[in-house]
Image (cartoon, rainbow, N blue to C red):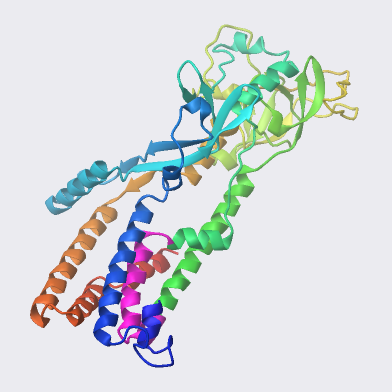
Amino acid sequence: MIIVLDYYGKVKGGVAYGLLANSNDSMSVFIFVWHLAAIWLIAMLACKRRLRNYFRIECSLPQARVVQVEERQEEVIMTEGRQNRLTQLVTKAYNAVVLKFGLNIVAESCATQHIGDNQFIEYRCTRYVFIEKAGSFECHAFVLGETHRSLLDCHNGLTSAEADARLTRVGENFIRVYVPSFLVGLLQELFSYTYLYQMMCLFVWFYFNYFKLALVQLCVILISAFIKVFIRLRSERRVKMLAERRNQCRVRRNGIWVDLDTADLVPGDVVAVEANMEVICDGCVLRGEVVVDESSLTGEAMPVRKLPLKNEAIAYDPQNSASKAYSVYAGTRVLQCTGSSYGSAPTSLDTMVPVDSAEPQTQILVLRTRTATDKGKLIQRILFPIRYSFVLDEQLRVSILALLAYGGVVFGLSIWLMGADRTSWYYGLFVVSQAFPPLLPAALVIGQS
């Protein structure tokens, strides 16, 4: 930026090249700094997820304060049987480059946390506890039973000690969604290869006396970035409202019905059900009958009736259609249930005073919480979607590759025809920016938005 300002005489005494003596020195320094900045920024973009860990000391997992989690990003191919030979060749070369340099591996740094002797990390809204025997962090899942009868045997609920131990393993029944501020979201948006290419082209335009044209294009690029960030953050806030639901419910703890926050629910808890109650966990009906509205989860318009488990050795699988008649799911709402009024006022868990001597007529057993629920998995898929590759994506790669190849050819011709001097380098970049315009990604963004 200083070199650009010096070109226009804004640095020293209002005289052009007041800092760098003459135009040849100024152009040489600009070309050197431009290449240095491009290499440095590309390296920063390539290592941005791992950069801070390069300055940390590697150690064993039990001693670690930060754990780097690497996951291979899946891609679902939706173009089989519709590709021509050129598209297939480009896709094959693209996949080879991705595998060679690990471009499909997503790295994230997670801070370790401790509760008692348990060490765990939170990765993508899920808790992973360190298992010393396995030497790794693993997601814990509780299997309460595989038959109706074995699940009915859990009707007494949990003790406070059992609930605390399970809460440490699976975490709170609450999905926290991080939504950055607009400024942070804008910086995240701009720190990408697309905007790097645009900015590097515009810097050349600013320097070589195309200030007004570059300023107009910069405004268009920034406006498109603002629009994209605004839409993304608005969508993320809606997901946050959907995910961060919590309420009060009645739970059997130590054989006594107490009032608890739904964030404290763990697998094995027995919860009393009332009409108009939003279900915050996946579970099965132990007692009574329930009519629920599942439209927010499955799109089913008609209310669904849920029956209590049978005291028989019938196999139970919540994903099986035969077992869904006995299952309730997080994100659904209870429309009607057997008995929805219990009479007395609830108390807190600290006093351990019964909230009501009467037994609730409708009860469910908590089977899964947090991201283990169907609603939690849906939120995970929204926040961390799997990439789908369609025909247009494959064709776009071919188009971009053709434009880049064309830009490389005309850049070489510019250097050859104008002579290998400083001026030809600038005109070569002008031709490249015309072959692959900096506004092209902005036009795509505005069209999608």
Q: Residue at x 52, y 12 (%)?
A: 315
Residue closest to the eye, 314 or 390: 390
Please state the total of marks drawn on the protein image: 0
- Image x and y of residue 2, in percent: 40, 78
Q: State the residue lying farthest toward the left.
A: 417
Q: Is residue 210 magenta?
A: yes
- Image x and y of residue 296, in percent: 59, 42
Q: Residue at x 44, y 92 (%)?
A: 13
**Image quadrant in which you'd find residue 53:** top left
| Above or below: residue 294 compared with residue 228 | above
Residue closest to the eye, 23 or 420: 23
Quadrant placement of the N terminus: bottom left
- Image x and y of residue 358, in percent: 86, 18
Residue closest to the eye, 33 or 337: 33
Q: Is residue 119 left or right of residue 350?
A: left
Looking at the magenta stretch, what is its main secondary structure?
Answer: helix
Q: State the residue lying farthest toward the top.
A: 313
| Above or below: residue 61 compared with residue 78 | above
| Above or below: residue 115 compared with residue 433 | above
Magenta-highlighted residues = 191-215
**Image quadrant in which you'd find residue 369:** top right
| Above or below: residue 371 compared with residue 311 | below
Q: Residue at x 73, y 35 (%)?
A: 277
Residue closest to the eye, 190 or 150: 190
Residue 91 shows up from this direction: yes
Q: Residue at x 19, y 79 (%)?
A: 422
**Image quadrant in which you'd find residue 125:** top right
Residue 301 shows up from this direction: no
Q: Is residue 345 left or right of residue 154?
A: right
Q: Is residue 241 left or right of residue 156?
A: left
Q: Is residue 414 magenta?
A: no
- Image x and y of residue 122, in percent: 55, 35
